[in-house]
Amino acid sequence: MKNSYYIYFKMENMKNITKGLRIILMLPFTFLRIIIATMGLLIKWIARIILKNEFEDERKFLEISQNKRTELYKENEILIERNKQLSKRLERLKYIIEKNNNSKTEASLTKYGEIVLITYSQINIFDNIYLSGENGDDKFWDSVMRFKDYGSEIKIADFVTKNDSENRGYGRALMNFVIAEARRKNVKCITGDLSNVDSDSFEWLIPFYESFGFDCILFNDDKMIRGSIRLTLESPIKKVS
């Protein structure tokens, strides 16, 4: 009995020793598993940060791309509209030239840089001179000047710029053309009347003529204010812009 107990005790000790040895032998593998698990978690954490940063970069890139696309779309719309306006202006100039194919047409610029076409008779330039702007509103003309031709003197019988075309420099461009042509044809002076009908416009009309060198005289006639203008063309050319 004593030997049996001894053998049992010895076997139990062997089992415990074996179990202890197994635990000791498994420790490196346990530590390795812990290290691998920890590395896996660390890798996942790093991967999440990298993916988050990449996603944020992609989001910013997409936002920039969308903004750029919106800007390009707007710029394209502007270019399309400008192209339409340019085509419209070219068609207008083409129409004016074709309409006046029996007259002489010259191109000039207003002080704002707008192209204008000046049309007049080939027989006598100082008959009616018409001006049409590329951005004008009228189908036929935007400003016109009519004359009485006395040879060495021309008189402005009518000078009209349509209301929709005022303040575009059409009248000034037309006057510059008339004065230049009058000098070229050796006209000595340009005259005209300031009608009482235009008395409400004298405040700006008189400075307009005076800017070209006209002498403007006002006088009362039966309680009506009217006047006259006169430009002597012996002095050097004065082009007003």
Image (spheres, grey):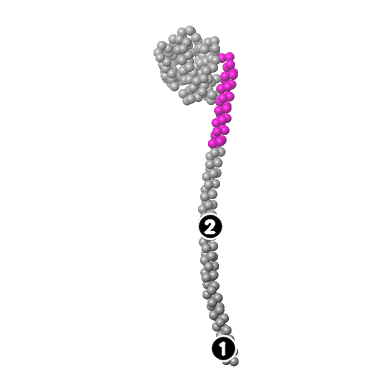
User: Which residue is depicted at the point 43% across and 18% down?
Assistant: 239
Where residue 157 appears, x then y in whole percent?
50, 13
Q: CA distance from mark 2 to mark 1?
A: 60 Å
Q: Choose between 47 and 102: the one closer to the eye.
A: 47
Q: Nearer the viewer, mark 2 or mark 1?
A: 1
Query: In the picture shown, does residue 41 fall above or below 17?
Result: above
Identity of the residue drawn at 54% across and 38% down: 72
Please give the residue where the numbered disc 1 appears in the rendered image: 6
Q: Mark 1 or mark 2, which is nearer the start of the sequence?
A: 1
* Secondary structure beneath label 1: helix
Q: For residue 153, which numbered disc appears in the image?
A: none
Q: Residues within 10 Å of mark 2 (few under 14, many from 20)?
A: few
Name the residue rendered at 56%, 82% in the picture: 14
- Region of the chain picked out in magenta, as a range: 74-103
Magenta stretch: residue 134 in it?
A: no
Mark 2 — residue? Answer: 47
Q: Amino acid at mark 2?
A: Ala
Report the predominant secondary structure element of the magenta stretch.
Answer: helix
**Residue drawn at (52%, 18%), measured in percent from left and top?**
106
Question: Horizontally, is 224 left or right of 122 in the view?
Answer: left
Does any portion of residue 3 appear in the rendered image?
yes
Q: Quadrant of the C terminus?
A: top left
